[in-house]
Structure formats: structure tokens, C-alpha cells
Amino acid sequence: MIKQSIITIATLGLLSVTASAFDTASCVGCHGADFEKSAMGKSKVVTDMTAEEITTALNGYKDGSYGGPMKMLMKAPATAMSDDDIKAFADKYGKK
């Protein structure tokens, strides 16, 4: 019982570290190195969006309330982002 609890706590700790260390490397295949492409010819160009639009989109992908027919492709990457990750990403790539 104690061993199982320690394993569970260690796993949750690892997941929280992983979630807060979001890396955009998996995004560039579809969105381009500078987020200048329309993913699969269907998405908005990220760098054409404001920080507020990016935040709304990523939070919507997380809860399933945003996106078209391809939205399920974005659910996992968006879910891996913490609120701080989303804010940092939106501030960095959002149109000024």
C-alpha cells in the first residue's frame, strides 16, 4: 500500500513537471517553425491571431468548445499546456 502511494505521488509529480514544461517542437510540423502556416490548410495562421484569440482557441481545444472538424487533433497538445504555458505562448506568438 505504501509502495503504491509513493509510485502514484512520483508519477503525479512527473506529470506536473512535464505539463509545465511545454515544448512547441511538436507543433511546428503542422504550423511551421514560426507558426506562419495554416495547419493542413484548415486552421487559422497562429501569427495572424491576437494573444486573446490564441488563448481562447487553446482553452477551447482543451475543453472541446473550439475548433472545426480537426479539433480533436489539437486536444492533446492543448491539454498538455498549463494556463501559464498558454499565456506565454499567446504573448510570444500573438499579433501585436
Image (cartoon, rainbow, N blue to C red):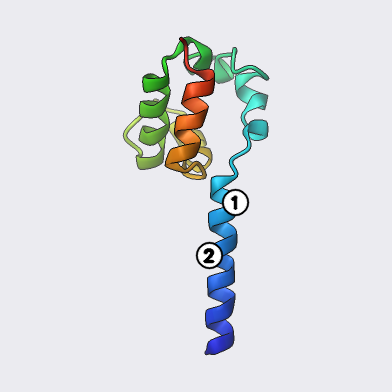
In space, the residues marked 2 and 1 are separated at their CA atoms by 10 Å
Q: Is residue 67 visible?
A: no
The residue beneath circle 1 is 18
Residue 57 against residue 44 in the figure, above or below: below
The image quarter containing residue 53 is top left
x and y percentages locating residue 28 in the rendered image? 65, 25
Residue at x 53% of width, y 72% of height:
9
Residue 57 against residue 35 in the figure, above or below: below
Q: Nearer the viewer, residue 75 or 36?
A: 36
Residue at x 59% of width, y 13% of height:
37
Q: Nearer the viewer, residue 71 or 45?
A: 45
Residue at x 38% of width, y 35% of height:
59
Q: Nearer the viewer, residue 53 or 66?
A: 53
Type of residue at label 2? Leu
Helix, strand or loop at mark 2: helix
Type of residue at label 1? Thr
x and y percentages locating residue 14 in the rendered image? 60, 60
The residue beneath circle 2 is 12
Residue 17 against residue 51 in the figure, above or below: below
**Of all residues shown, which one is farthest toward the bottom?**
1
x and y percentages locating residue 91 in the rendered image? 48, 23
Q: Are marks 2 and 1 in contact (CB under 8 Å)?
A: no
